[in-house]
Image (cartoon, helix red, strand yellow):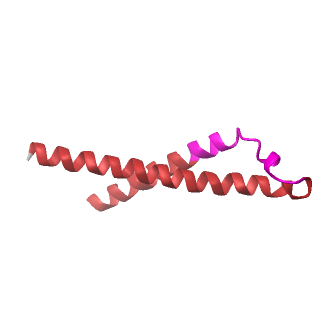
Amino acid sequence: MSTFFNSMAVLFVRMVFIILSFQIMLKIDWKRFFSSSNTYVAPYLCVFMSLAVGHLVGSFAITIIELCQSILAQVLY
């Protein structure tokens, strides 16, 4: 049962960071990076970049949380 809650917490943290990165990536004018004939690619780039950054930052946050849990467990037990 503990692994279920752990998995759900990991999923929740990653989804939060993906949504946050998507909201931040929406503020960037992606069309200026492409020529006028390729501007249709800009929304796709925004989605893929937010997935990549959100996953990376979420994984970092999960690693930090697990590290703090293990340090706390060693100190208390």
Q: Say whether residue 33 is left or right of residue 6.
A: right
Residue range (magenta): 19-35
> What is the residue that sits farthest to the right in this orientation?
37
Q: Quadrant of the N terminus?
A: bottom left
Majority secondary structure of the magenta segment? helix
Residue 64 appears at what percent x and percent y? Answer: 33, 47
In front: 39, or 62?
39
Residue 73 appears at what percent x and percent y? Answer: 16, 48
Determine the residue positioned at 13% across, 48% down. 74
Q: Say whether residue 38 is left or right of residue 3.
A: right
In front: 54, or 5?
54
Q: Say whether residue 58 is left or right of residue 52.
A: left
Q: Say whether residue 8 is left or right of residue 17.
A: left
Determine the residue positioned at 57% across, 56% down. 52
> What is the residue that sits farthest to the left in this orientation?
77
**Residue 11's quadrant in the figure?**
bottom left
Determine the residue positioned at 80% across, 58% down. 41
Magenta segment includes 18? no
Determine the residue positioned at 8% across, 47% down. 77
Magenta segment includes 28? yes
**Residue 27's quadrant in the figure?**
top right
Residue 75 appears at what percent x and percent y? Answer: 11, 43
Numbered disc total: 0
Residue 54 appears at what percent x and percent y? Answer: 54, 50
